[in-house]
Amino acid sequence: MTSSEGPADEPAAARRPRRALRAAAAAGIGLAGAAAAVGAGELVAAFTGPASAPVIAVGSAAIDLTPTAVKDYAVRTFGTDDKPVLLAGIYLTMAALAALAGLLAARRPALGAAVIVLFGCLGGWAALSRPTAVTTDVLPSVAAALVGAVAVRYLARLLRRVTVRPAETGPVPASGHDRRTVLLATGGTLATASLAAVGGRRLADARYDVSTARAAVRIPAATTHARPVPPAARPAIPGLPSFYTPNADFYRVDTALTLPEIDPRAWSLRVHGLVDRPLLLGFDDLLRRPLEELDHTLSCVSNEVGGPYVGTSRWLGASLPALLREAGVRSGAQQVVGRSKDGMTIGTPLDVLLDGRTSLLAVAMNGETLPIAHGFPCRTVVPGLYGYTSATKWLVDLEVTTFAAHDPYWIARGWDRTGTVRTASRIDLPAPFARVPAGDVTVAGTAWATHRGIAAVEVRVDGGAWAEARLAADADIDLWRQWSYDWTGARPGTHRIEVRATDATGAVQTEARATPFPSGSTGWHSTVVIVT
């Protein structure tokens, strides 16, 4: 064999499998480096707080920067799974960039490491951009950048030894020992990264979990009880939602990727701003105040017509209006801005809070201590308003201020400042595209116009005349009202059923369709059924 013959002159088709294998190995080291970065970040975040973990910080920043139309699409399309979908998207994007980093590192290790460092810088910026950020929140991203970059450079150098390319003699195939070394190093990095990530999460759970502290809370009995809900308000119709929504089934729509965990022994509520007497309350102080019950149907402004983001609970808490009067609200004040532990701000019009309705600093929900997912240890509940202007979960601060002085989170993003709940009605059964036998069919559902009440519900089939539905007893203007309608003589075929409600002021629910942004969806809910 002459010097011009040998491996360097092998056919291109024979070299492709080796190139593909080398590219796959390079991508693998990039993924291993990224995994090491994530693991290091999670481990350090166990000491600085779960929200400071790089992926969580980037996800939280992404939520804040996402246009309203995209947020609406995410809620509409993915529902309460929108957060897992977001995190999955971040991890997939990171995996793609990690693979690119590995391919670059196979040629120039410093370039591959730079990609990992850039991701760490992004995480650091995101962590420090949070409204409640402290300097140490950047540490998980710094650790991620350093560990990830070192891992990529180390693995890339091992990979480059697999095939040595002398200047004249052509490539020298690597030994099996070299290949095994790369595989073992890559696999070991992935395994160690996984252990670090899981260990970091578990350590964070152990350090920040407040489930035990929550379980130890003893909520005093109410001094003011809600009016009993009459049995006639809860018709026994199979398939109709229960009048009270169980806590486990109550909807949750918020921006928190990690639930704020607040030890009630360390919790405090500051009341300040345009008040004569600023206040600072601990949790025991709050529990010593007179506690009131409130039955209330809460709905989310993101709810589409006929959507699921509505539920009824019996809340228990201290009077928010009484607390404001104790603080002495000054002339010119227009809103109360509630701040969450995670920095979320919710603005509630002051005139609504002081018009006589029962508004609470809630500490219990449906007979149990407030669940962590719904705001433990304290949240606000204000009837008649959507949650985005009334429901501050994980509440730690109340500022009495003016509209001009501060735009809360959602108002700054273009949503209506007041957040008054629109009249809505929903067909709960038959289910969409249900097959029902010909003859008599029961149609039933719920309607709500909180703090106004429901006066009537009407149903029509196939665009015919409206017929009045049978209303369950009216429990309170702050509660939904269930209804039913006997559709007699249903004939075989496909039929469309529509519903509309009239509130207690006499206003009929509008037919005009509107999206949730900026002040809540409107339109008549309809469903299609197949009569057999």
Image (cartoon, grey):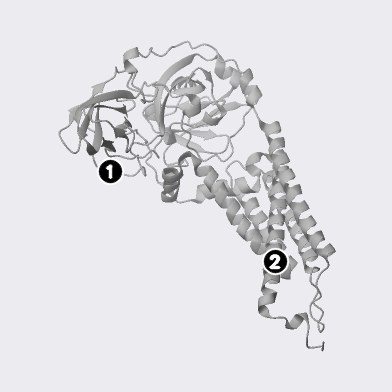
Check disc 2: other Cα within 10 Å, few if <14, some if 14-19, many if 20+: few
Picture coordinates of residue 354, whole percent (x, y): 39, 24
The part of the image, by quadrant, that contains residue 462 is: top left
Per the rendering, the mark at residue 21 is: 2
In the depicted structure, whether residue 345 falls above or below residue 354: below
* Residue 151: x %, y % from top left: 76, 57
Residue found at x 30% / y 39%: 522
Residue 209: name its quadrant: top right
- Residue 199, position as x, y percentages in the image: 73, 40
| Numbered tag placed on residue 474 in the rendering | none
Q: In the shown orientation, is residue 177 left or right of residue 290?
A: right
Measured as percent of width and height from the top left, residue 204 is found at 69, 36
| Mark 1 residue crowding within 10 angstroms, few (<14) / some (14–19) / many (20+) | few
Residue holding disc 1:
513
Q: Amino acid at mark 1?
A: Arg
- Taking the image as shown, residue 117 lies to the left or right of residue 362, namely right
Mark 1 vs mark 2: give the one in front: 2
